[in-house]
Image (spheres, rainbow, N blue to C red):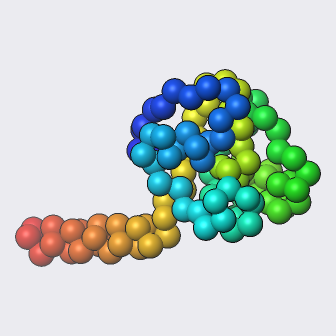
Amino acid sequence: MPEGKTVSVRPGVTVLAAARQSGVHIPTRCGGKMGCLMCKVKLTEEESSHVLPPKEEERRKLGTLIDEGIRFSCQTVVHDHVQVEVPEDPLKAAVRRQLESARNRDREDFI
Ligand code: FES
C-alpha cells in the first residue's frame, strides 16, 4: 500500500526484499544494515502478528514509533500474509500537493 501491489515470497524474507521484488521503491542507504533508518514502513496491529517481532536494537532505534506500527522494512521478516503501508516519499508528496493545488486553481478559474 498505497500502490496496491502484491507479491508472493517465502517466509523468512524481509519486507524490503519483498518490496524490491514487487518493484515498490523503499528508500535505503545502508543496504539493510539498520544504519540509515530510512526504510520505515507501517503495519497495523493485526498485521504485526504476521511478521517476526522486532529485536531489541530495532526497538531501541525506533523508540516510540514502534507503538504506531512503524518498523524498518530491512528488519521486518515476513512469516504470513501481510499488508504493509509504504509512506510516500516526502519530495513526491510535496510535488503531488503542488500539482493538486494548481489543478484546483485551474478548476476555480474555469467556473
Ligand atoms: S535499509 Fe537502512 S535501516 Fe533499513
* Looking at the image, residue 20 lies above or below residue 27: above
Seen at 68% across and 56% down, the residue is 32
Seen at 65% across and 35% down, the residue is 13
Q: Quadrant of residue 107?
A: bottom left
- Residue 16 position, x and y percent, is 60, 47
Q: Tell me, yes or no, if residue 76 can be seen here.
A: yes
Seen at 49% across and 64% down, the residue is 89
Q: Is residue 75 left or right of residue 21?
A: right
Q: Tell me, yes or no, if residue 97 can be seen here.
A: no
Which residue sits furthest left? 110
Which one is nearer the viewer's eye here, 63 or 54?
A: 54
* Looking at the image, residue 85 lies above or below residue 36: above
Marks counted in the figure total 0
Which residue sits furthest right? 56
Q: Is residue 55 left or right of residue 75?
A: right
Quadrant of picture, ligand 1: bottom right
* Looking at the image, residue 110 lies above or below residue 67: below
- For the C terminus, which image quadrant? bottom left
Which one is nearer the viewer's eye here, 26 or 48?
A: 26
Q: Is residue 34 left or right of residue 54?
A: left
- Residue 99 position, x and y percent, is 28, 70
- Residue 20 position, x and y percent, is 50, 46
Which one is nearer the viewer's eye here, 55 or 66?
A: 55
- Residue 22 position, x and y percent, is 45, 40
Seen at 74% across and 66% down, the residue is 35
* Looking at the image, residue 17 lies above or below residue 94: above
